[in-house]
Amino acid sequence: MKNIIGSNAAVSQGAAAKAVKYLEVDEESAGQRLDNYLIRQLKGVPKTYVYRIIRSGEVRVNKGRASADSRVQPGDVVRVPPVRLPERAQDGQAQAATPAREFPALLEDDWLIAVNKPAGVAVHGGSGVSFGVIEQLRRARPQARFLELVHRLDRETSGILLIAKKRSALTGLQDQFRQRETGKTYLALVLGDWPANRKVIDTPLRKYLLPSGDNAEGERRVRTTTREDPEGMKAVTLVKVAQRVPHPLGDMSLLEVTIKTGRTHQIRVHLASSGHPIAGDEKYGDFARNKALEKAGLRRMFLHAWRLRFTHPSTGETVALEQPLEPALQNFITPRAAS
């Protein structure tokens, strides 16, 4: 990373930068998401602040606005506004320390790690979350020279998550995801009887913000839109009924859901917009049914990254991984014998 204007040294604690900075992206940072790139460059700056300056448009890439998930490339010039590091709290509790944590590994070699992410754990810090899987894993492995997320899962979603241990593995795997050369299949329990002939959902999605409260920006959400919407993003989801689940609170369907595009909240919005929201989904689900299901034992959203297929970035061999449902989810859909 070249700092074109301004010192490359970190801003001292409690001091403001004197001017806007312009950072030139180097080869080592190629392919990183903009948010991750800035978090690494602006050491000590809270992740929530990084996301705020990106959303506000104060961060520019090659003089244009960019989203947090856009990818930086060698030679890109990133404009960073003056930033102020928070004063150290008197009680030492300004920011909770990131705990070191290992996660169950389905596969690990010199190139990558495939872990089973638990529900309720974010994949990375930001947007009100101090830390996630990647920060905890880095803390547990201080000797690791490189650990980066290949893709993402919602905080409430469990299952297979890929982490690259080399830059070449990261770029190679991300290329596969972008070019739809991977197979990603989830298990989702939805309300109602899903029609067996409803196998493809090809409906564009659009991001929007909920009205903001007094102390915060509006929460990001996603909705379906029309093909004519210039801000709509193509989204394709394949659905197969795996099991009908009779239940005293209403029949449900266990679905095998394969995504051909990786849009934010794609599965959740596509299924909900079809009239069959995911059980336990607090954002797009049936809130009254969710409360009843929670009392019946379902204490999380029933969405699980079940299977993942990709080409190994070093050997070229096909890797097929599968992570079964956790016992709590499996028991919820397993018919109980009559007493």
Image (cartoon, grey):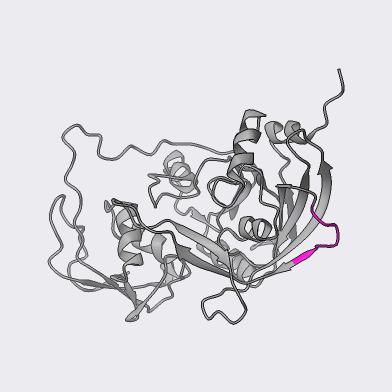
Q: Is residue 188 visible?
A: yes
Dividing the picture into quadrants, the one containing residue 111 is: bottom right
Q: Nearer the viewer, residue 327 or 235?
A: 235
From the viewer's perspective, is residue 54 above or below residue 306? below
Q: Is residue 185 left or right of residue 49?
A: right
Q: Residue furthest front?
A: 288
From the viewer's perspective, is residue 286 above or below residue 185? above
Q: Is residue 93 left or right of residue 226?
A: left
Q: Is residue 85 left or right of residue 137?
A: left
Q: Position of residue 10 (x, y in %)?
A: 21, 58
Q: Position of residue 204 (x, y in %)?
A: 62, 72
Q: Residue at x 46, y 54 (%)?
A: 146
Dividing the picture into quadrants, the one containing residue 22 is: bottom left
Q: Residue furthest top?
A: 339
User: How many labels sit on residues?
Assistant: 0
Most common secondary structure along the magenta stretch: loop
Q: Residue at x 77, y 53 (%)?
A: 256
Q: Residue at x 16, y 46 (%)?
A: 87
The quarter in which the C terminus is drawn is top right
Q: Is residue 300 visible?
A: no
Q: Position of residue 273 (x, y in %)?
A: 65, 60
For the magenta stretch, what is the residue range? Answer: 194-200
Q: Position of residue 244 (x, y in %)?
A: 83, 44
Q: Nearer the viewer, residue 122 or 169?
A: 122
Q: Nearer the viewer, residue 326 or 116?
A: 326
